[in-house]
Image (cartoon, rainbow, N blue to C red):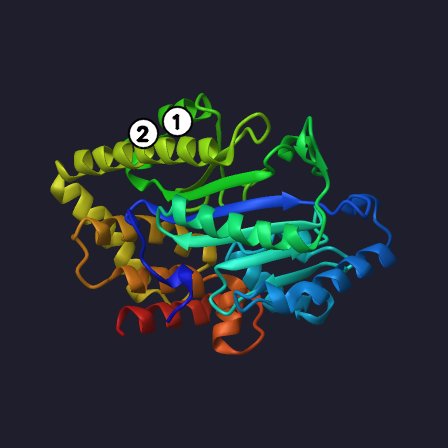
Amino acid sequence: MSNWYLQSGKDSDVVISTRVRFGRNLEKYPFSLRCNKKQREDLVKDVEEILPSLGYGLRLFKLKDIDDITKMTLVEKHLISPEFALNENNEGSILINDDENICIMINEEDHFRIQVFSAGLEIENTCNLAIEIEEKIGEKLQYAFSEKYGYLTSCPTNAGTGMRVSVMVSLPGLSLTGNIGKVLQAVQGFGTNIRGVYGEGSNSQGNIYQISNKQTLGISEKEIAKNIKIVTEKIIEQERIARKLLTKNEIELEDRVYRNFGILSNCKKITWNELNDKLSEVKLGTDLGIIKELTDSKIMKLELYGKPANLQRYLGKTLDAYERDIERAELIKKIINE
């Protein structure tokens, strides 16, 4: 079985992935920012003690034992945050399973960032699994909890349920028809944030956006999940309407997506940013059945293995930026012709 990020899911023409995250802290230690080295190490020891009884095939890795390229592959897959990977203290750890659909960051902004991922729009099942894991850890280790504020987190905006539901969407249709601004504005009014691919403070790349709930306090997990589902379904509907609109001018659309496909098929070198931009419209052409040479599976491979760290990991060698651009072009041709 391949990892979740190389699989197609529900509504995967528009929705790339679903993530459910819980921020949790243990009662016995200060918040991560106030934790000293020994307390952080003791927290990891607590996790090691309960690990055999957790299940899910989870294994513990300390960041200081992970090489830089591997750490960046995890960032590129959205499994860990860039700040966590680049932390100079290197006192963070992760619990991760082989499929990589469960990744728990330890000693990040909170003691635990419990994350579960799925391909496509899969909010309910992803929520259920995340809640199950959160409860299992909570049975063994006492979470910091207040009757008034719910679960306590380092950042007040995460207090309450401590739950964040994020859906990654690809919106080339809305971008090409010029309607993206209106839709993004409307989304903000429904208690949701819409951000770039790496969350807060990041920009959209290749027409990819992340939708997540703003509120975690005074709202139940079920309500959060329901709201995100409703908003995402509206965005899917608007994106598909935009795509239908684009198909009315058939020659223009075919010319545009095939020009991008032509560059990917024939280039001798290409940067990740350029691949990302071209791939957005090539995926659109593939989803609409215009580009017959590609499949969902090939698009996902191009998207993953085109990224700088994952490219080097795939090829098994360290490359500078110029070498990566050349090797990336070769790999694109290989994947297209598989």
186 left or right, relative to 312: left
Residue contact between numbered discs 2 and 1, judged by CB atoms under 8 Å: yes
Which residue corresponds to the image point at 64% horizontal and 61% vertical from the top-left? 94
User: For mark 1, what is the residue?
Assistant: 181
Viewer-nearest of discs 2 and 1:
1
Between 75 and 251, the one lying in front of the other is 75
Residue 336: x %, y % from top left: 28, 68
The local secondary structure at tag 1 comes to helix
Which residue corresponds to the image point at 52% horizontal and 59% vertical from the top-left? 102
User: For mark 2, what is the residue?
Assistant: 178
Q: Relative to residue 174, is residue 56 depicted above or below? A: below
Please name the amino acid that badge 1 sits on. Gly
Q: Residues within 10 Å of mark 2 (few under 14, many from 20)?
A: few
Residue 140: x %, y % from top left: 68, 56
Which residue corresponds to the image point at 36% horizontal and 60% vertical from the top-left? 300
- How many numbered badges does the structure rendering display? 2
